[in-house]
Image (cartoon, rainbow, N blue to C red):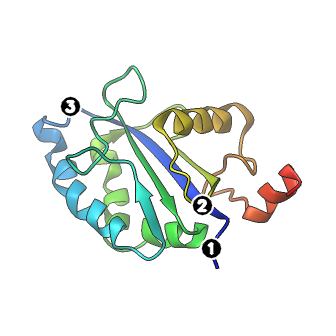
Amino acid sequence: MTQAYQLAQANIARTRAALDDPLMQGFVEQLEPINRLADDSPGFVWRLQTEEGDATSIQLFEDARIIVNLSVWESFETLKTFVYSGAHLQVLREKKSWMEQLDTPSLVLWWVPAGHRPSPAEARQVLARLEQLGPSAAAFTFAKPYPLSALLESTGT
């Protein structure tokens, strides 16, 4: 049976320096292995990437040091398992070494129709919605998740 909806996630971060700066070497060295781990993880569907295999050169904001990660997963559970376990969890623990604290939400989750590939512009809009309105069935976080049923109820489907 084909799943009607999947979970999109976008996260942004402001690097402490340009990616070619020695300060960012540890982060840059982990990009390929972590992306490969995501690609091979249960529930992974798709991620935004350039020919280089990552999305670090895709500029979503005027600030060139803000990088974006955008992906789609089969479910909330499969994404959460990937994010909060193994090698990815270790990268999260080291995040402050490479990334600055943002004054706005840096992560947003939302339900998309199966097969939909969100654009960077869509991710930016959903992040803005989360910042302006707080968590809802249309834009939420790991800390305040909304099940698919909440979205379906809010849209009357």
Q: Is 113 on the left-hand or right-hand side of 58?
A: right
In the image, residue 123 above or below residue 78: above
Seen from the viewer's position, the closer of residues 4 and 19 is 4
Whole-number angstrom distance, CA of label 1 to CA of label 2:
8 Å
Q: Could you say whether the residue bearing mark 2 is in a helix, strand or loop?
A: loop
Q: Mark 2 or mark 3: which is in front?
A: 2
Structural distance between the alpha carbons of marks 2 and 3: 35 Å
What amino acid type should be assigned to the residue bearing mark 1? Thr
Estimate the x, y position of residue 156 in percent, counting from the top left: 89, 54
Disc 1 + disc 2, Cβ < 8 Å: yes
Per the image, the residue denoted by label 3 is: 18
Q: Which of the 4 image quadrants contains residue 65?
A: top left
Labels 3 and 1 touching (C-beta < 8 A) = no
- Tell me: 62 left or right of 51: right
Secondary structure beneath dot 3 equals loop
Q: Secondary structure at mark 1?
A: loop
Mark number displayed over residue 2: 1
CA separation in Å, label 3 and label 1: 42 Å
Q: Nearer the viewer, residue 54 or 128?
A: 54
Q: Which mark is residue 99?
A: none
> Closer to the camera, 30 or 58?
58
Residue 108 lies, in percent from the top left, at: 57, 47
The residue indicated by pointer 2 is 114
